[in-house]
Image (cartoon, rainbow, N blue to C red):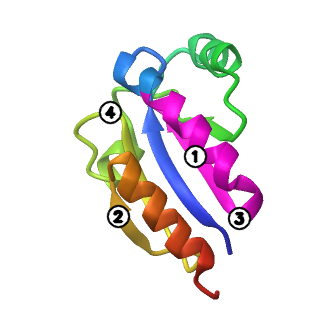
Amino acid sequence: GKVCLLSFWASWDQASVSHNIPLKGIYNAYHNRGLEIYQVSFDSEKEAWVNAIQFDELPWVNVSELSYPESSVAHIYNLEELPVVFLIDRKGEIVGKNFNRIDLDRNIQRLLNKPS
């Protein structure tokens, strides 16, 4: 029943690591209102992935398939680049992908204010 950002990233990808900075602001602004970030890493080394989460102090749910580049998740979501973020409503429907920050804020607010 939460609004969710499904984020795909990798600790070895500088664009992904940089993208986590604004995600922290979004998380801090909206988590208490019902937003959850669920992040999936495409790392192949557990230690590098865990170290990146700890170093960047990422407070949200973070999982890894640890099978990159043979990732079934990347295939299912048809991912061709990183980072990628999907916005998912309370019903589990994907409502958008890779919004800019202004549109992401606007859509999160709209979904959080929408009755379930």
3D distance between C-alphas at marks 1 and 3: 12 Å
**Is residue 30 in the magenta section?**
yes
Tell me the residue at 43%/30% (across/down). Answer: 19
Question: Which range of residues does the magenta coloring cover?
Answer: 19-41
Residue 99 visible in rendering: yes
**Is residue 25 in the magenta section?**
yes
3D distance between C-alphas at marks 4 and 1: 19 Å
Quick check: marks 1 and 2 in contact, CB under 8 Å? no
Front: mark 1 or 3: 1
Image vertical order of residue 2 relative to residue 57, above or below: below
Q: Secondary structure at mark 4?
A: loop
Amino acid type for the residue under numbered disc 3: Gly
Quickly name the residue at label 1.
26
Amino acid type for the residue under numbered disc 1: Ile
Q: Secondary structure at mark 2?
A: strand
Quickly name the residue at label 2.
96
Q: Magenta segment, principal secondary structure?
A: helix
Q: Residue furthest bottom?
A: 115
Local packing at callout 3 (Cα closer than 10 Å; few below 14, some 14-19, many 20+) is: some
* Residue 79 quadrant: top left
Tell me the residue at 41%/69% (across/down). Answer: 94
Image location (x, y in percent) of residue 58: 67, 29
Amino acid type for the residue under numbered disc 2: Gly
